[in-house]
Every structure is written in C-alpha cells, then in structure tokens.
Image (spheres, helix red, strand yellow):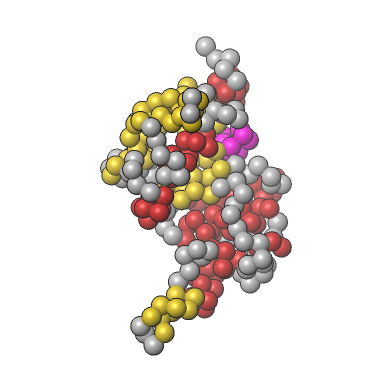
Amino acid sequence: MSTLELSGVEKSFGAVQVLNGVDLSVSGGEVVGLVGDNGAGKSTLMKAITGVYSTDKGRITFDGIDITNLDPGKRREMGIEMIYQDLALAPQQDVANNIFLGREPTKRLLGLIPCFVDKSRIDVEAQEMIDRLGVQIPSIHIPVGMLSGGQQQTIAIARALTFKPKLVIMDEPTAALAVREVESVLNLIEQMRSEGIATILISHRLNDVFAACGRIVVLRRGNVIADLKRDETDMSEVVSYIVGAHG
C-alpha cells in the first residue's frame, strides 16, 4: 500500500487554477523528486498534502485513510512532516529547544499539573537524535543562529525525525548550501529512505534530485506531465519536460 495517494486533486485561487487533477503516489522508503518551474504548483501541492490548503476536488489518502478534510495538526499526528525553505527555526534558542519547538515535553507539578517544560529531557532526547543522525554541530546548547546554513538544515531535519514521521516533505533543502553541506543533507535523506520513511524532495537543483531520488515527478502548470524512474531518464529529458519542450 502506498503511504501517500493523491487522486484528481484540484485547487484554484479565484479564477486561477493552480492544480489540475493531480495524481501522485509515494510509498514508504521511496524518495520522490518534485520538480518544475516557478509557478508550476509545487508549493500549493505540498500545502494541499499537509492540510495548509483545502482542496477543491480530489482525494488524498495516507496509509489507506482519507485525510482530504483533516486539519494540518491531525495530518502531523498521522506522520506527515514538512520542512519549509525558511526552516522555521528560532535563531536565539539553542539547538535542543529548536528540535522540540512547539512540542516541548512537560513535567508535572507534584505529579499532577503539567506546567514546566522538561528541559533535561529535551536535552537528552535532542542529543540522542543528533548522535543517531551523525549531525556535525559543536553543541546542542549553542543558539541555532550561530550555525551554518547546512547545520541549520540538518537541525530542521532532526526536528522532523524526532516525531517519527512516515512522510517528510522537504522544500529546497540544498538551495543555499555549499557543496560539502549538500552532501550531509543528501546523506540524511538516504538515512530516512533506509528507515522506510517516504520523502518528497522539492528542488531546482537537478544534480541533487538525481543523487537522492529514485523517481522524478515533473509538475507543469498544475499538471503532472512526467513521472520518471531516475534510472530510465537523464537530466536533459527532465529539463525538456520542465520547460515544456518535450513531445
């Protein structure tokens, strides 16, 4: 069974049709690259999957359950995580706090009322996740704003993985990174794949898409115009679909 299944998904804003009956499936342990020009509908499609946008038509199922009308919080509880391009990190807070941002474990006062953030547990569990992923950072206690772009990206990935997702959507994770930092992000994507996590990678960097993804889906003007196996295509064919020159 596919982890994620989209069937005939449509979305418009006023008179502008942004998604035109999109069909897409992503299975556990599969890394799918989603590519297309600016305005192709990639961001809208991802927000439809995460529940940020409601859809006008079509159906979205996740692990066999219809999630079309579920809110973002419910979808997150089911295991759908998205790492946005701006990372949504708090630069003044330390690494550990960022990993648990918005979902901090609490201690109970006298064993009754949950009222204190359990910082010691945050530190322990954050360190465990950093160690498990092999993320290279000086310390979990330094402010995230002092880290490099690549380190911040790996913290955002660590945060997503702490909550045991089944699907992770990554929006341009390597766009602003140096070559060495790209490698560490691609290694984390491979680790996610090996753990059976489904991954959708949105990227303009086709080198990274070909390095990380087994399948490449091309979106153009709100339509899926190609769904290609990486080993059966090449960069020039993908580019020709993106720019509308194919066929």
In this rendering, is residue 171 above or below 224?
A: below
Q: Which residue is located at x 56 percent, y 47 percent?
A: 84
Q: Is residue 38 magenta?
A: no
Q: Nearer the viewer, residue 45 or 231?
A: 45
Q: Identify the residue at the far top of this view.
A: 247
Q: Which residue is located at x 35 percent, y 30 percent?
A: 57
Q: How many discs mark residues in the rendered view?
A: 0
Q: Which residues are magenta?
A: 203-213
- Is residue 160 in view from this perspective? yes
Give residue 237's quadrant in the image: top right
- Is residue 214 in view from this perspective? no
Q: Nearer the viewer, residue 135 or 164?
A: 164
Give residue 50's quadrant in the image: top left
Q: Nearer the viewer, residue 173 or 78?
A: 78
Q: Which residue is located at x 42 percent, y 44 percent?
A: 51
Q: Position of residue 126 (x, y in %)?
A: 53, 68
Q: Position of residue 176 (x, y in %)?
A: 69, 45
Q: Is 209 placed left or right of 229 in the picture?
A: right
